[in-house]
Amino acid sequence: MYTGHGAMLSLPKDPHTGRLLREAHALKLPTVTLCHGPAALLATRLEGDKQFSYKDYQAFCFTDATDTKTPGFGYLPGHMPWKCQEALEKEGMTIMNTTETGDVTVDRELITGDSPYAAKKLGEVAAPILVKHATG
């Protein structure tokens, strides 16, 4: 599971993360992200065929529009170093939300939530999928 704006710092450039996520994707293992967590998915393009494994997937993430506002009300100490939503969309992922409302979606094996508001619902959606995968 990848969560929070910390996922934007090194994970998108980490080849180990990329290999792990490419393998999980190839095996159709459930993958769960929350908030800025989908940024880690960008690491899948670092090695191998250098293709983004989640092209044509639909997901929720913390929006770039909200990121520009968060330092003003103290959620972050400053602006993010790059735009997560823009980078994912550039790679062919469809980000379905325009704001953060606590929404969750499942597209194939990828389970995403838009913000900390989605944490409880994300757990409720992801847990049965993970249990089914582990026992089935």
Image (spheres, rainbow, N blue to C red):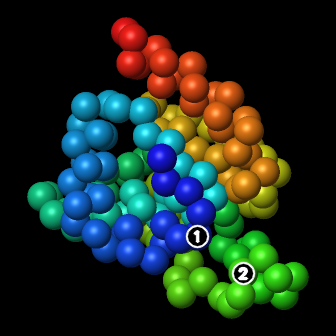
Cβ atoms at labels 2 and 1 below 8 Å apart = yes
**Which residue position is annotated with label 2?**
76
Dot 1 amino acid type:
His
Image position of 6 with respect to 49: above or below: below
Judging depth in this view, the residue of 66 and 30 nearest the camera is 30
Answer above or below: position of 89 versus 65: above
Q: Evaluate whether residue 77 shows in this view.
A: yes
Q: Is residue 128 above or below residue 15?
A: above
Residue at 63% in and 58% down? 35
Q: Earlier in the sequence, mark 2 or mark 1?
A: 1
Q: Position of residue 117 (x, y in %)?
A: 78, 51
Q: Which residue is mark 1?
A: 5
Please tell me which residue is depicted at 84% across the width and 87% down the height of the picture: 72
Label 1 Cα neighbours within 10 Å, binned few <14 / some 14-19 / many ≥20: some
Residue at the extreme right: 73
The answer for how far apart the CA atoms under marks 2 and 1 are is 9 Å
Residue 47 screen position, x and y as percent = 16, 63
Image position of 72 (left or right of 5)? right
Query: Relative to the observer, which residue lies in front, 60 or 79?
Result: 79
Residue 126 lies, in percent from the top left, at 57, 30
* Label 2 SS: loop
Report crowding for label 2: few under 14, some 14 to 19, many 20 or more residues within 10 A (C-alpha).
some
List x then y, in percent, for residue 79.
66, 88
Q: Nearer the viewer, residue 50 or 27?
A: 27
Type of amino acid under label 2: Leu
Q: Residue at x 59, y 63 (%)?
A: 4
Q: Is residue 69 visible?
A: no
